[in-house]
Image (tube, helix red, strand yellow):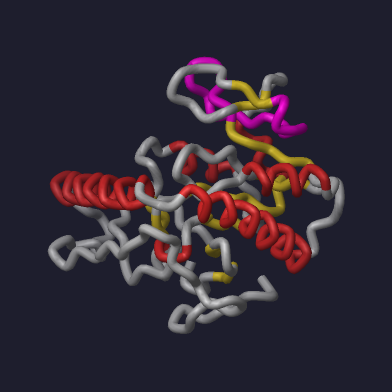
Amino acid sequence: MTGNDAPNDAAPSGAAPHALPGSGTTDLRDPHLDLDSAAPSLIAVEQIEDRKDDLRAAIKDRRSQLDQRALAASAEEIAQQVLDLTAALGIARGETVAAYVSRRHEPGTLPTLEALHGAGFEVLVPVLGPALDRCWGRFTGVDDLAQLAPGRPLEPRGEPEEAPAVGRARLVLCPALAIDDAGVRLGLGGGWYDRALLHAAPDATVIGVVYDEESRHPRLPRAPHDIPVRGVLTPTSWWHLTAA
């Protein structure tokens, strides 16, 4: 990756990260877990998942207190960062970018989806298919999104494509609650992306999207099934994780 590449021990390039109003810091390190074991025991895995749940609760609580006007502004900033990233990666008009429809309090992605679609990219977003299959739908505009089931993010109304569709994406944008310097992504806990990313192309650039203060944490608990991301994108910058 070019552009805002930064080594693990350096701050991301570009604009200095800013803290949104109402934000704070959460200590995501846990010195009591043996996270380096090559084959963690069932007890160790349960400890990891318990720690993840605690972190999720803390980060979701902090996100719920963020200023809504600042969040709206950050969504526009994220869209510009994504366009800059596609240019740096040399992704051409007509090629595929996999993204997602943000939920409340997440870094907003609707401006990103509109910008990518308007720039001529094929844009895929997650769709929960039959029997909870992990599928993808083509984003063709905000007006085509609908709440197809309670508790799910908005989804395209069109016929979904099966899980391997993400394999044609040059860039995959993933939601996250936090990301550490090794690319470990703290997700919502359903395992959707850890399974979906098994179908991503080996050379795809997989990027986690978080607020500035949720990036570059020294260490997050990682379970055996967790797939790391290769980079981070925030409202103010993006960078490659050389350890991922």
94 relative position to 234: left or right: right
Within the image, what quadrant is residue 215 found in?
bottom left
Q: Residue, x 75% and y 68% (percent of image)?
A: 88
> Image check: 144 left or right of 9?
right
Range covered by the magenta-colored residues? 127-144
Whole-percent x, y for residue 146 in the image? 62, 22
Task: Please state the total of marks drawn on the protein image.
Answer: 0
Image point (49%, 80%), residue name: 11
Picture layout, residue 160 above or below residue 219: above
Residue 26 sits in which quadrant?
bottom left
The image shows residue 35, relative to residue 126, as above or below, that is below
- Depth check, front residue: 175 or 134: 175
In this orientation, which residue lies closer to the viewer: 10 or 111?
A: 111
Q: Residue at x 36, y 60 (%)?
A: 23
Across and down, in percent, residue 70 comes to 51, 55
User: Magenta stretch containing residue 50, yes or no?
Assistant: no
Q: Is residue 132 within the magenta segment? A: yes
